Amino acid sequence: MIHRSTILKHFAVVILCLVGSAGTLLKSEETQEKKEVPTIEDAMIFNEAYGWVKKAEALMGTPKENSDEQAGLYLKATQIKPDFLEAHYNLGLIYSNQNKIEEAARAFEKVIEIDPAFKGAHQLLASAYHKLGNLEGAIKTLESGLQKFPDDSEMRKALASLQIDAKMDEAASGNLVKLVEADPADLAVRTELAMLYQRNGRMDKAVDQYLIITNKDPRNFAANYNLAQIYMRQKNFGAATEKLEEANRIRPGDPTLLERLGDAYAGQKELEKAVSAYQSALDKSEENERLYAKLGFSLANLDRVEEAVSPLEAAAKLNSKNADVFYLLGYLYTELKRTAEAIEAYNKALEINPDQKDVHYNLGTIYAEQERLNEALADLQRAVQLDPQYVAAWINLALVYEKIGKDPDAIYAHEKAIELGGGKASSYFHLGILYAKSGESDHAIDAFAKAVELEPDTYRNLLLEELKKVHSALDTVRYKDKFLHLLQMDQPVE
């Protein structure tokens, strides 16, 4: 910014020249062009205007500096001499200090109109335009200024900043690259360039810039932290942890940083460290639903069930719309035998998102254990509707069908589970019982054979115990040679 007194000295010299050279013509030694020398009348006009400027300057350093009175004096000078550059310039400065931005813009526009190469005026006018919301005008003003002063780094920085605001990222990166090339040691500009690359998904270029910064300044917080964000996005949790730990040494205790550090530890399955980081973040911040949830999930994954419940309940209290929190609470309550609370939590999760297959499965299983069979049936059916490949849900659904006497549906569900690879010995055993009850003895014996093959002692003994009943589901197969051979018996049990 040009200091006012410097320009005044210049004009003081000019007025002396005007008085002493009236009516003569001067020839420029450089251009050999003829120029008209100002007349005595011009000098008198300037002298009158200059008098008002001197009065305005006399108010500098007093309580009236930047006052309406001082502005009025400069304005008077411009009315007398409309091309009085310094008066317009200082008037713009006063209006800027008074936050009269429209008036300041008009004053700086006049400065550039009088002298398009007046250094500093383009930035002041661009700043005024920016405050007025005229981002396009601010950018064009700085572009025009750079045509006059292509090596002005401050003006180029200002232009790049406005271009970033305007989402003109390609143009902004071009200007930032020029600045870095001109001054490779300017780490602030290099950081802006790296952040711009990062915002636009050009991660390799961003990493290159951040690494240059950390090599020159290992304790640069922004570079370490932003590098970590990129590594996290790339699932490179080890590198992310290293940079976040360094950032935490530079600026210890920042809750956002500690949360991200917890995320990095969790990504590496270092859950104890993740718990510690999340807890530290909570200690240094206000109640945070997201942090409570992350802490609860980490504790749950460490099988610290009772400890996990409290932060998850806090998360649920702060945000009643997080289905995942209620789902995990339902699971933990089940583990703690708090069945009523588990059912409530699962139902809350389904209110938020009714298409959670695992919630339907878990809730259906609880209902089945409580003999609430119709409710169990509804949830288990919904689970397999949402995921027809859900083996565990097919198995439990088959068992519920059995209990309510829907044998054909039970047979279908067991066979579906077996088809999907869920061929447990218990599934084959139940399937054999159902086939035997329906008189399909060959299918029944084949199913029993598979159960015995998988768990010989368990299912031979179960079949023998079933045969001892007076009225047994095995009555249709008890005399079949194939069945007796399966049980390693010569005679049927009567």
Image (spheres, rainbow, N blue to C red):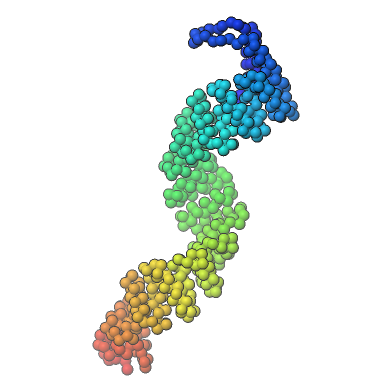
Counting every numbered tag in the picture gives: 0
State the image coordinates of residue 436 (x, y, percent, origin top left): 32, 85
User: Residue drawn 53% across and 68% down?
Assistant: 348
Q: Quadrant for the C terminus, please.
A: bottom left
Q: Is residue 221 above or below residue 356?
A: above
| Residue 95 falls in image quadrant | top right
Residue at x-position 57% and y-position 36%: 130
Residue at the farthest left position = 481
> Residue 290: x, y in percent?
55, 57
Image-based side of 3 in relation to 461, left or right: right
Front one among 13 and 44: 44
Residue 193 point in image, percent of width and height:
48, 37
Q: Residue furthest right?
A: 63
Q: Can residue 324 be seen in this view?
A: yes
| Residue 336 in sight from this viewpoint | no
- Residue 375 to residue 47: above or below: below
**Left or right of 492: which side holds 181?**
right
Q: Which of 344 and 13 is in front in this view?
A: 13
Image quadrant in which the N terminus is located: top right
Q: Where is residue 2 in the image (x, y as percent from the top left)?
A: 61, 24
- The structure residue drawn at horizontal position 48% and vertical position 64%, both measured from the top left corner, is 353
Q: Which image quarter: residue 434?
A: bottom left
Up the image or down, 56 lies above or below 328; here it is above
Q: Relative to 196, is 306 above or below?
A: below
* Left or right: 80, with 470 as reference point: right
Q: Using the image as rendered, state which of residue 298 and residue 421 is in the foreground.
A: 421
**Residue sitting at the far top:** 24
Does residue 377 appear to the left or right of 273 in the view shown?
left
